[in-house]
Image (spheres, rainbow, N blue to C red):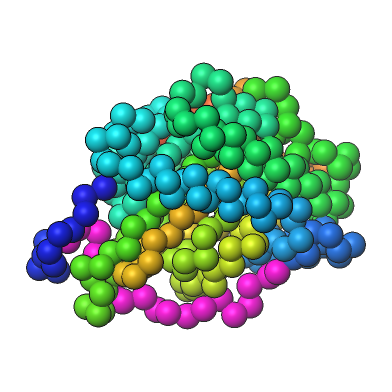
Amino acid sequence: MVVLASTPAVDHIPLLRSPDPGDYFAGMPVVDLSSPGAPKAIADACERFGFFKLVNHGVPVDTMERLESEAVRFFSQSQAEKDRSGPAYPFGYGSKRIGLNGDMGWLEYLLLAVNSASLSGACPVPACAVFRAALNEYIAAVRKVAVRVMEAMAEGLGIAPLDALSAMVTAEGSDQVFRVNHYPPCHALQGLGCSATGFGEHTDPQLVSLLRSNGTSGLQIALQDGQWVSVPSDRDALFVNVGDSLQVLTNGRFKSVKHRVVANSLKSRVSLIYFGGPPLAQRIAPLPQLLGRGEGEQSAYKDFTWSEYKKAAYKSRLGDNRLAQFLK
Ligand code: GA4
């Protein structure tokens, strides 16, 4: 990550965005995972927005804060030190470049492979044992939440068995990824009426994503009518979003939400994101329990496996509509 020593002319700064609409997401669904109404509230939120805030999720505050401080420590190392943990593909440290097809963002990050409930042993990054322990503790806890959320989704959809969705992330060989993002403040833009794109608009290819941030705002989601709204940050909550694969499994009932991050001009944002994906061979197609219901309801999608979808996703640009080519 290049630190700007002096204020460059605005037109020399890449990734500029016009002023934000600034609208806060007033109607954001907040779900209490410990309440009996959670399954219905989750299913409603996934149908309306593909997004909700989760409270009383059970990940201890200490576990979240320990990982946050280890991440801050990692990113405060010298550039040369961090580059030793790169490149990000397939897994490791990356700066500004997102994916392999030319997308850029005002961030640095770690992209990590998750094996069952912890970092994959084959993933050598990060090398620091304390950081790895904090990651493993957090990943084990957040993955349990993902399983509970996916069980609640099945219950809310009224489908059996309860693990019809969650079994895909608990299965041997499930394809889970963890990402630690650091968006440094973009001081150069302070007061200039514009902001930097931290992570450009996109949908997540997986089933579900669970995000925790350090309380610095920046996350925005697109509502179904295309309007972008800012998500008020909350360091104690988890934010859950539906990914493309879950949209397909529910035959479009749940919406894969478009989201993006705008860099803050004053404060650093650190986010921790767990992406729950199925095993590579998993067929991604509407659940028969859902298709059986409606009068002659047909799948809206061509048949594909997670491996095929993932391959297509990694060939795409960040903002592409990746599901379009799989629509019937
Ligand atoms: C979006 C969700 C996850 O962050 C991610 C991203 C991946 C990457 O950063 O390498 C992708 C992006 C994400 C979707 C399209 C492709 C792949 C960047 C990109 C341009 C790790 C993932 O699985 O897909």
Q: Residue 327, can we see it?
A: no
Residue 167 lies in quadrant: top right
Is residue 15 found inside the magenta-colored segment of the image?
Answer: yes
Asked if 302 appears above or below 216 in the picture, the reply is above
Q: Which residues are magenta?
A: 13-30
Residue depicted at x 35% and y 47%: 76
Residue depicted at x 78% and y 47%: 148
Is residue 199 found inside the magenta-colored segment of the image?
Answer: no
Q: Residue 105, can we see it?
A: yes
The C terminus lies in quadrant: top right
Left or right: where does residue 6 sit relative to residue 136?
left
Q: Residue furthest top?
A: 122
Pick the front one: 302 or 1: 1
Q: Position of residue 282 (x, y in %)?
A: 65, 27
Pick the front one: 206 or 33: 33
Main SS type for the magenta part?
loop
Left or right: where does residue 142 sit relative to residue 257?
right
Residue 162 lies in quadrant: top right
Residue depicted at x 22% and y 78%: 192
Asked if 157 appears above or below 218 in the picture, the reply is above
Q: Position of residue 234 (x, y in %)?
A: 59, 67
Left or right: where does residue 295 sit relative to residue 2?
right
Residue depicted at x 30% and y 34%: 81
Q: Position of residue 299 (x, y in %)?
A: 67, 43
Rendering quadrant holding ligand 1:
top left
